[in-house]
Image (tube, rainbow, N blue to C red):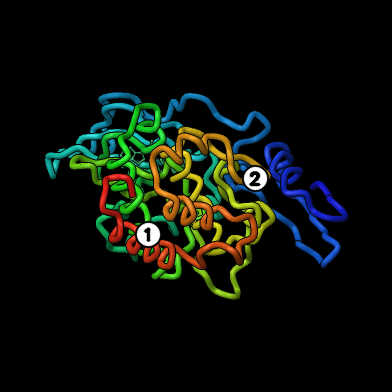
């Protein structure tokens, strides 16, 4: 536990996030409360990452699935490409590490499975099935091509980036309309599918917006909104994170604290987008949550109005 007194410095909190589980922040205006910074860090231990998983090997059988390869190996779980021998198709299997399994850890994954079922949208990755197989908790999903995080390593045309933007907004606005705050909007959590379809996944940190919910600062530091790092996730935090994803996609650069405007990469942004679209993006990335769009539904409506007006390919 780390205590910070006086005016909370978001930068301090973000830096400390990688080394402390719980941070107590007090400000001049009142108490911010304890900030539980990340379930992932809590479970990852001091090294932060477990390294390559030895959970399952290629050709290994898991119920009706045959494992083909490991797609990702995060701090909490591994994701595999597998063949479903009953349906005769490939799927992605998300499997939390059993050695970390406790009731809280499992609750995150159960919630993830339930929330994804609650949503029904072409841009939200559905869950095909979640069950225990050989004592492992297994979430089966349609298999995508790669994440937006991987895709960002290669050039994306302005037209395609605008199309992805529209789809990401549609996904997040659907989640928000169901009162779900994603809390971990970042390129790695958008999965690409054939025909340029992009889908939002990884609802493991999500919150249902109810007054009674105990706020926590879970999320990924790089795309985390300042108030979320301080333990107050809100719809506007997702708006901010999506703003950073979009800024990164068009400019090639991820803005950093204190998010001064114009941020690095602004020149490239200006060469691709017209001023009203840049103003729209800036509003999403405002430091004060009250100055942003109040949720992704509003953000999407504003985007649609701008795109409708654009006559040339640069929106
Ligand atoms: N359905 C899928 N198809 C292809 N790759 C996927 C799929 N789901 C996840 N991945 C890959 O696995 C990574 C981790 O999955 P994710 O659900 O975000 O779990 P984590 O909780 O570890 O972040 C993603 O960033 C992506 O690269
Ligand atoms: Mg993820």
| Vertical position of residue 309 compared to residue 248: above or below | below
> Distance of mark 1 from mark 2, alpha carbons?
23 Å
Determine which residue is flagged by label 2.
Answer: 260
- Give the number of the disc on residue 231: none
Left or right: residue 193 versus residue 211 is left
Query: Which residue reaches farthest bottom?
Result: 211
Q: Quarter containing ligand 2?
A: top left
The residue at the point 61 percent across, 66 percent down is 290
Indicate left or right for 52 with 141 as reference: right
Task: Out of 208 and 266, give the one closest to the viewer.
Answer: 266
Q: Where residue 55 appears, x then y in whole percent? A: 42, 30
Q: Residue at (73%, 46%) from the top-left corner?
A: 13
Few, some or many residues within 10 Å of mark 1 (<14, 14–19, 20+) = many
Q: Is residue 230 visible?
A: yes
Viewer-side residue, 70 vs 277: 277
SS type, badge 1: helix
Which sits earlier in the primary sequence, circle 1 or circle 2? Answer: 2
- The answer to whether residue 107 is seen in the rendering is no
Could you tell me residue 196's position as x and y percent? 23, 42
- Residue 107 point in image, percent of width and height: 50, 57
Residue pictured at 45% horizontal, 41% vertical: 270
**Does ligand 2 reach within 8 Å of label 2's beta carbon?**
no
Q: Which residue is mark 1?
A: 303
């Amino acid at each position: 536990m780390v205590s910070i007194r006086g005016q909370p410095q978001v930068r301090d909190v973000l830096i400390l996030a990688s080394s402390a589980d719980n941070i107590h922040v007090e400000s001049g205006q009142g108490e911010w409360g304890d900030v539980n910074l990340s379930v992932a860090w809590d479970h990852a231990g001091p090294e932060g990452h477990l390294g390559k998983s030895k959970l399952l090997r290629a050709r290994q059988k898991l119920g009706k699935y045959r494992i083909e390869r490991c797609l990702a190996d995060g701090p909490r779980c591994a994701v595999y490409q597998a063949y479903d021998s009953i349906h005769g198709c490939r799927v992605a299997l998300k499997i939390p590490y059993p050695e970390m399994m406790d009731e809280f850890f499992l609750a995150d994954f159960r919630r993830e499975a339930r929330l994804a079922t609650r949503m029904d949208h072409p841009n939200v990755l559905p869950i095909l099935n979640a069950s225990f197989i050989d004592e492992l908790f297994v979430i089966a999903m349609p298999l995508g091509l790669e994440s937006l995080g991987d895709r960002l390593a290669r050039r994306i045309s302005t037209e395609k980036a605008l199309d992805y933007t529209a789809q990401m907004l549609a996904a997040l606005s659907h989640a928000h309309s169901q009162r779900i705050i994603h809390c971990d909007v970042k390129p790695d959590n958008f999965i690409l599918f054939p025909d340029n379809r992009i889908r939002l996944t990884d609802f493991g940190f999500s919150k249902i917006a109810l007054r009674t919910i105990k706020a926590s600062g879970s999320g990924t530091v790089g795309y985390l909104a300042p108030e979320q790092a301080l333990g107050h996730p809100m719809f506007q935090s997702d708006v901010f994170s999506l703003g950073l994803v979009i800024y990164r996609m068009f400019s090639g650069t991820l803005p950093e604290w204190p998010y001064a405007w114009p941020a690095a990469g602004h020149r490239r942004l200006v060469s691709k987008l017209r001023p009203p679209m840049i103003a729209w993006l800036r509003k999403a990335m405002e430091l004060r949550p009250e100055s942003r769009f109040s949720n992704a539904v509003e953000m999407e409506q504003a985007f649609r109005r701008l795109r409708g007006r654009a006559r040339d390919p640069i929106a």
